[in-house]
Amino acid sequence: MKLDELYNDDNYPATKVNFNGLVTHFIKSLCLDENAKGTLKQSIERGNWIKPEDTDIQEHHQKVIHLFNWINQVPGFSRGAMSEAEKHRLYVATFPTQWAKQFQSQRGFTDATTYESIDEFMQTQKDDADRSKKKRKKEEENNNRRNRGGQQRQRNGGGNNNRNRDKI
């Protein structure tokens, strides 16, 4: 059944609840996986939705919230919407593995866990990772300069030794 047929049959009159029902029905009609909800959750847990390095925490947060909305819309064997605790657990799983492990060991999941507390922790992890990356890049550049300087001296006859030879 096509979307316009659903709507024209007055199956979904223009109310918020019925509009959401129309969206859910349409998504189910497009989704071939009868347990897409479980498949999507498992793909998050396996690390398929890790935050890209060049994405800031807030942008990532928004994308994951959209993903969670999809999870609640697609067909699946588990009924109902995800709990906040499950969303928080899955949200942490969308960050680099080391960050997620540190969150679990330092903060853990409690009733007080919120997206904001997760975002604050992950922002600190990102800031630390950015500083480390910048430091490694600077050290690498310094090493490359030193190596190029040594190679240049070798091409010029070994640097100071060449000057001493001319004086003899």
Image (tube, rainbow, N blue to C red):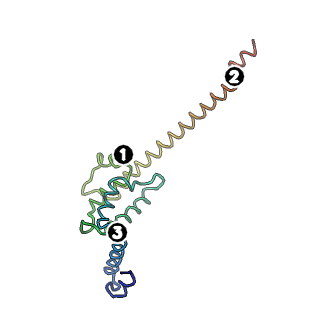
Separation of disc 1 and disc 2 at Cα? 48 Å
| Residue beneath the point at 45% across and 54% down | 52
Q: Secondary structure at mark 3?
A: loop
Q: Name the foreground residue: 45 vs 164.
A: 45
CB-based contact (under 8 Å), mark 3 and mark 1? no
Mark 3 or mark 2, earlier in chain: 3
- Residue 85 in which image quadrant: bottom left
Q: Residues within 10 Å of mark 3 (few under 14, many from 20)?
A: few
Separation of disc 3 and disc 2 at Cα? 70 Å
Which of the image's four quarters has the C terminus? top right
What's the amino acid at mark 3?
Leu
Place of residue 99 in the rendered image (x, y in percent of width and height, measured from the top left): 36, 48
What's the amino acid at mark 1?
Gln
Q: Secondary structure at mark 2?
A: loop
Place of residue 1 in the rendered image (x, y in percent of width and height, measured from the top left): 35, 81
CB-based contact (under 8 Å), mark 1 and mark 2? no
Mark 3 or mark 2, whichever is nearer to me:
3
Mark 3 or mark 1, whichever is nearer to me:
3
Separation of disc 3 and disc 1 at Cα? 34 Å
Residue at mark 1: 98
- Residue 128 in which image quadrant: top left
Residue at the top extreme? 168
Q: Residues within 10 Å of mark 2 (few under 14, many from 20)?
A: few
Q: Name the foreground residue: 23 vs 26.
A: 26
| Left/right of residue 109 with respect to residue 147 in the rendered view | left
Reply above or below: 12 against 142.
Answer: below
Residue at mark 3: 32
Mark 3 or mark 1, earlier in chain: 3
Residue at mark 2: 157
What's the amino acid at mark 2?
Gly
| Left/right of residue 108 with respect to residue 134 in the rendered view | left
